Image: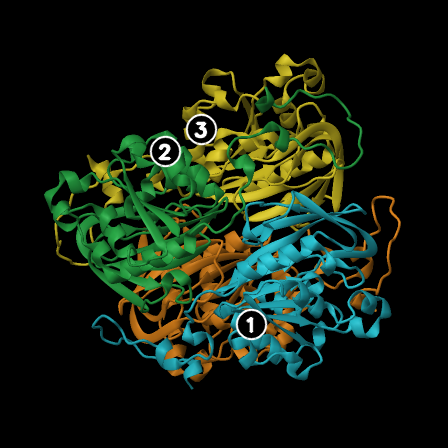
Chain colours: A orange, B cyan, C green, D yellow
Amino acid sequence: MIKVIIWNEFVHEVENNEVKSIYPDGIHNCIKDFLSNDKSLTIETATLREKENGISEERLKDCKVLIWWGHKAHDEVLDSTVNLIHRRVLEGMGLIVLHSGHHSKIFKRLMGTNCNLTWREYGEKERIWICNPGHPICEGLDPYFELEMEEMYGEPFQVPSPYETLFTSWFEGGETFRSGLLYKRGNGNIFYFRPGHEVHPTYHDKNIQKVILNAVHFVKETSKNIWQDIHSPTPKSNRPDPIENITKKGFSVGHPTEK
Amino acid sequence: MIKVIIWNEFVHEVENNEVKSIYPDGIHNCIKDFLSNDKSLTIETATLREKENGISEERLKDCKVLIWWGHKAHDEVLDSTVNLIHRRVLEGMGLIVLHSGHHSKIFKRLMGTNCNLTWREYGEKERIWICNPGHPICEGLDPYFELEMEEMYGEPFQVPSPYETLFTSWFEGGETFRSGLLYKRGNGNIFYFRPGHEVHPTYHDKNIQKVILNAVHFVKETSKNIWQDIHSPTPKSNRPDPIENITKKGFSVGHPTEK
Amino acid sequence: MIKVIIWNEFVHEVENNEVKSIYPDGIHNCIKDFLSNDKSLTIETATLREKENGISEERLKDCKVLIWWGHKAHDEVLDSTVNLIHRRVLEGMGLIVLHSGHHSKIFKRLMGTNCNLTWREYGEKERIWICNPGHPICEGLDPYFELEMEEMYGEPFQVPSPYETLFTSWFEGGETFRSGLLYKRGNGNIFYFRPGHEVHPTYHDKNIQKVILNAVHFVKETSKNIWQDIHSPTPKSNRPDPIENITKKGFSVGHPTEK
Amino acid sequence: MIKVIIWNEFVHEVENNEVKSIYPDGIHNCIKDFLSNDKSLTIETATLREKENGISEERLKDCKVLIWWGHKAHDEVLDSTVNLIHRRVLEGMGLIVLHSGHHSKIFKRLMGTNCNLTWREYGEKERIWICNPGHPICEGLDPYFELEMEEMYGEPFQVPSPYETLFTSWFEGGETFRSGLLYKRGNGNIFYFRPGHEVHPTYHDKNIQKVILNAVHFVKETSKNIWQDIHSPTPKSNRPDPIENITKKGFSVGHPTEK
């Protein structure tokens, strides 16, 4: 079984009646519902205002994929939560970042850039083109698909060059955007997928659901290996004895982390 | 004129007599000395314990290359300093990170990984091989060069895949290491160069000096363009009006940064 | 002075009166005209049906940038010509591939893929968005610019992931396309730029002219170093003696290229 | 079942008694033997001097991984064979290129560079370091392992920057080399793995066997999707009708491949 955790900010759905009408149980439960058809997955959810943001070292330990949706409360996510997730992504846990998650702490930390973009909340049509129809994340899709209403995201999207660009979007108002990007950091596969504004029924769309399910299987952690030192630098294993028979030369100051 | 700032932690040279004997005026002034032969450069220095780490928005504004050496006091670097440098690198300022700077706040932020490695302070021989003799950073070098005494750094070096690997090192004790790596984040070129342990006279070595001078010219900022929004999100320019004549659909919640 | 060679197939302009009316002296001379305002450039041209396609080892030797336009006669380009260009790109010569040059022998050889795409010749509007306004190739451009009539190129564009995506296009008929891609192969910078269908006055457009001039300066060869062995494997330099004092073990068959 | 084809030049083993004594049934059968312990694999072999190099469109159709060993007879491989393999790699078939396969037609075509390196046939010790112990290809390995006798390969290795560098080697004579490189071209994962000189018993080594088995599982084709147009450009699907209701403007020359 592949354990998946869907994390949702879950603020808009509580505070705003129109969002609530689209996602009565929250975006996380909508995603959980359509993923549940895949019986190889064990699906859990977590939200911002649970204790420790619903994330603990224990819960992440055997989590193979984390899905992240956040928008208006990125700053409320605890740094300790971000640290736990960051560590697991470097170890190999897959991460799917949705829509406004481009400005989440975890995505910005992994990218190393500000992840800015332009936007317009106008409920306009988005047409999403497939750049690589042979990629596992694109299985079952036509050359393009459309969402009738979405928030516009436009270039420049300030992220590092991805390993691969899988989707590009066009918006009714005129803009284009690189809307499906694959990265690898440490041993974790990271997939950024643009659509999903909270005031539109995007996660009820069949094509969007296909992409997210495909992505779960593509980014999921598979390696049984973990580099021990990712967790906490253990001076001994990080300071190997020489293999060759050599004599120490010069003097030394000691390494700061050894103190 | 190309303005270069050499930043040095400048703690070992003050606290340790043996380091002081090698770099009486600090590593920064040793680097300044050999770079000064290039009359196209205006060279300044900055150190950790100056006010605001010697770094201000004003000083960085027209700085084309920042060179960074730090080791035992990474945590003392102010987050505000890291923010200023991060912004300028994304804008296009070149960054050269030396030796133990692999664990500096700015390098880790730009990489998005923990940047761990293995090490041994044994004063052993390092032999540095050139992976791309045709690269501007490698001009004037033989197929390899050696340093008689250096700290060992070994794999695994936990960084994202670089744009290019320019050097690989072998150490007398047996290890190998990818010791010259090129990255681009935003519009800034970043060069990580491994050698430079404070207890050895590495920055007095002619080949090391060649690499650093070559690197200054390779990573230096050249574009006259700056994307205005890197600085501070200016809602208006980030929220363009539609180009096409479209009608707003659905409802909206407003973007959190607009509040 | 920076030597630039503009290579043009120069077949459409001869055979087709409408193309001729737009580019009476050929696309190459149109490009030469607008580049000529930059007095740091020495500009030459070459065309398919000149002797040896107008390309010789001697002409390429000090050429810093080659611009390539071809469409209907890719197969007529001599393999010996492709070999000469390939070698110079690996050495460091910049290459700008325009429009239908995506199917040229030299571009396909450098990419290692088939470089297929979808297309439609419908004279439709193309809107070109800037993905990185801070990049030197994008200097002087607005967030987007438009061409009133162009051939449509659509995804999937079957090329390897680029070092950077600088432009994405939208077409009036509905498609999007990654229309400005940067690569590095060997020491040569390669820029693919989509627009430029022969039946439209694209190279008379001021924005297109800016991009091509900017690109010339960005991709131009700068290194003085050349790895000698790129040219012809010289067994001796490729078979170094051991640095360490070791004794030969086992037996050997000799390397095939030594025979 | 995962179908794997092991392709071997199979010339040294026939012509040279010492090579024959190490690999009496050929390198391909040695590799087949140790892979056969994995019952999820169906393993076939093919060699240069079989009809059409033992490769046909039919055999490749359901092949998920091709392993390639060649050395002295690269030029004898038919271009039609290379075309078939190239197409399948772009579609998604995994490719593992061993040792002197760096100069094979298929590897050079996929890389787009000359793939040169330096070498010395001296039967010297090779120590192979793991750059990413958490990668599936590195499962079950210690931080390094050694081969008592191998041919030396040294930098510069003239290939494009890989998606990831998994191994670096050191040789007794003093050189270092990036000896395990991952690429993606089209939808095919490509793994270059350096060791395997024919006069040494490298493929009898347990660590080498682990790497190759791990690599088979990592690079194997998994997508059910194939972009139809990779095969043969089918003008109709490549020339879509406009989605939007637009009117054709200007004139057209027709696309050369339509004729």
Q: Are marks 2 and 3 on the same chain?
A: no
**Which corner quadrant holds the N terminus of chain D?**
top right
* Residue at 49% across, 38% down: D113
Instruction: Identify the amino acid type marked 3.
Output: Val
The residue pinned by badge 2 equals: C81
Inspect this view and state whether residue C229 appears: yes
* Residue at 34% across, 76% down: A121
* Circle 2 Cα neighbour tier, 10 Å, few/some/many (<14 / 14–19 / ≥20): some
- Tell me the element at label 3: helix
Instruction: Identify the amino acid type marked 1.
Output: His
Which subunit holds the residue at mark 3?
Answer: D
Inspect this view and state whether residue A55 appears: no
* Residue at 32% across, 40% down: C103
Instruction: Identify the amino acid type marked 2.
Output: Thr
Q: Which mark is residue C191?
A: none
Of tags 2 and 3, the one toward the viewer is 2
Task: Give the spatial CA distance, label 2 vs label 1.
Answer: 45 Å
- Looking at the picture, does residue B117 appear above or below residue A119? above
Q: Position of residue D153 (x, y in %)?
A: 65, 35
* Circle 1 Cα neighbour tier, 10 Å, few/some/many (<14 / 14–19 / ≥20): many
Q: Which mark is residue B86?
A: 1
Q: Nearer the viewer, residue A78 or A48?
A: A78
The residue pinned by badge 3 equals: D82
B200 on left or right of D181:
right
